[in-house]
Structure formats: C-alpha cells, structure tokens
Image (tube, rainbow, N blue to C red):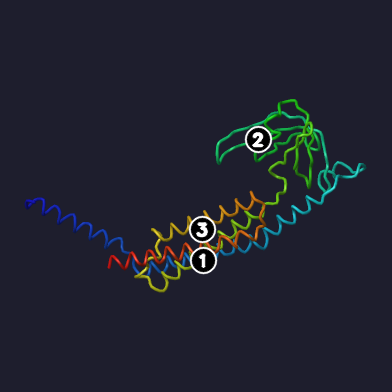
Amino acid sequence: MDAAQRAMATAQSAGKARKKRVRRVSPGWTRILGVLLIVVSVISAALCYLAFTQWLPSDRERFRDFQAARPCPAHATDQVRAETDCLGTWQYTVEKTVIKHGGKSSTYQATIKGGPSSHRVVDFGDPDPLLETLKPGDKVTGTIWRGTIVVLRKDGVRQNTSRAPRDELQMNAGLGLAAGLLAGLTFVFGAVRMVRPRTLAPFTWEPYGRRMAFTIAGVCIGVGLLTVWTGIPWPTVPAVAIPVVVCVAVVMYRSLRRGAEGRT
C-alpha cells in the first residue's frame, strides 16, 4: 500500500470514527426515549384492557342476541322490522355485484334496491356461496337485524353479510393479547433506557426488539386464526400464546447475551 492509499484509509477511518461519535445519543435523550416508550406501553396496555373488558364481551353478547332473535310478528310495522331485535325480511332486486380478488384489498359487494331503503350496498367476506351467482335483476330475500342486512338468500342458498355477528372471539383475544404483550415489551425497553442509558444491549430494536415484535404479532394472530378455524374456545389463545412468546423471549435474550460475551 503506497502513501496515498494509506492516507486515504486513515481519512476514511477517521471519518467513520467521527460518524460514530455523532450518532452516539446522550444519556438525556436516551432517557427521554425511554419515557416515550413507557407512554406507548401504557397506551398499548389500555388497548389490551379494553379488548378483554369491552370489545370481546360486547361481540359475545351481540352474537348471543343474534342467535336468540326470532322472526318479527306478522303485524309488526316496517319500522319495527327494520330497527328491533326481531328478524325482519324484505324482497330486494340486485342492481349489480362487485367481485374483486386482490389479497388485502379484495372487494365483494352487492348493490340492491327495495325494502325499507331504496338503495343499499351490502358487503361480504367471500364471493361464495351466493354472491358469485347473483346477476342484475335477480330477486333476493334480505334479513335485517337491528337495522342491518345480515343475510341474503335466493332459491334456498343463503350467505351472511360482513355485518352479521360472528362467533370469532378468538381473534378479539389474539389482537388484545398482542397489544398487552407489546405493552410489556415496550415497557421493558423504556425502563432499561431510564435506568442504564449507556448500556442498552441487548434491549435494542435490532435485532431483539424487531424479532420480538414480529414474534408477538405472528404468534397471537396465528393462534387466533387457528382457534377460529378449529372452533377452540378463545381462552386457549392466551393459554398458548403467552408461554410461547415468553419462551422465545428468554431463549433469544440468552442467545444474544452469549453472543455479546463471546465478542468481548
């Protein structure tokens, strides 16, 4: 290596050293970040609390009310049929349907007219078994519960709309649990920055924070979906997801600590 190359290498090394010094965050700013993380953890914990005390019980009660609903009396007025807990039925005419398969942006809709409203757009979660067979001009029977079309049927084929109550409390539990576990993760990261702002490892976003955030989201949503598909009750979600996430956190923490100790 000649003198010019050595000089260039020395300059590059000095530049990298200056960048590292510039990027180094002061303990004061680190503690401020810790406070912000703790605030985020409190918000996430509140969302978890609301999910299990408000959202999940509300959806459970709504589904039970829907299951217990009976057809409206024959003498009931249109307003009673449309707004009360009884199941009112009307005849509708299909104006058009929209079926777009696009992954996260899929659209399954039917535009119908008639009944207590002259024009309605009804959303579905899937195109089958009824929506994909409908054509403009088809006559369908709609079931309304609490002012919402919850079922469409034609020639003995029926399909629930996206507004129909469902017994899918497992996903409520999965999302609420994810918020609670993320609250714990951000609290720990915030507390570490408050207590020891100069030595954060391994409680940094890369790789520990990122891996744990994806683990929490993947496990909670995955277990939630699996229990929905299999019909297993929602308490199974926290019973399975919490031990899995805790085990992953401990194993990953020990692995990162051993790696750090090996480099020193």
Q: In which quarter of the image is residue 220?
A: bottom right
Tell me which residue sits at (23%, 60%) in the image: 18
3 or 1: mark nearer the eye: 3
The amino acid type of the residue labelled 1 equals Gly
Task: Tell me where residue 228 appears, x and y as whole percent.
Answer: 64, 51
Q: Is mark 1 on a helix, strand or loop?
A: helix
Tell me which residue sits at (79%, 46%) in the image: 145
Residue situated in front as seen by the camera: 157 or 75: 157
The residue where tag 1 is placed is 184
The amino acid type of the residue labelled 2 equals Pro
Q: Residues within 10 Å of mark 2 (few under 14, many from 20)?
A: many
Q: What element carries label 2?
A: loop
Residue situated in front as seen by the camera: 147 or 139: 139
The residue where tag 3 is placed is 216
Q: How crowded is mark 3: few (under 14 residues within 10 Å), some or many (20 or more)?
A: many
Q: Is residue 220 left or right of residue 7?
A: right
Q: How far apart are marks 2 and 1 (CA)?
A: 40 Å
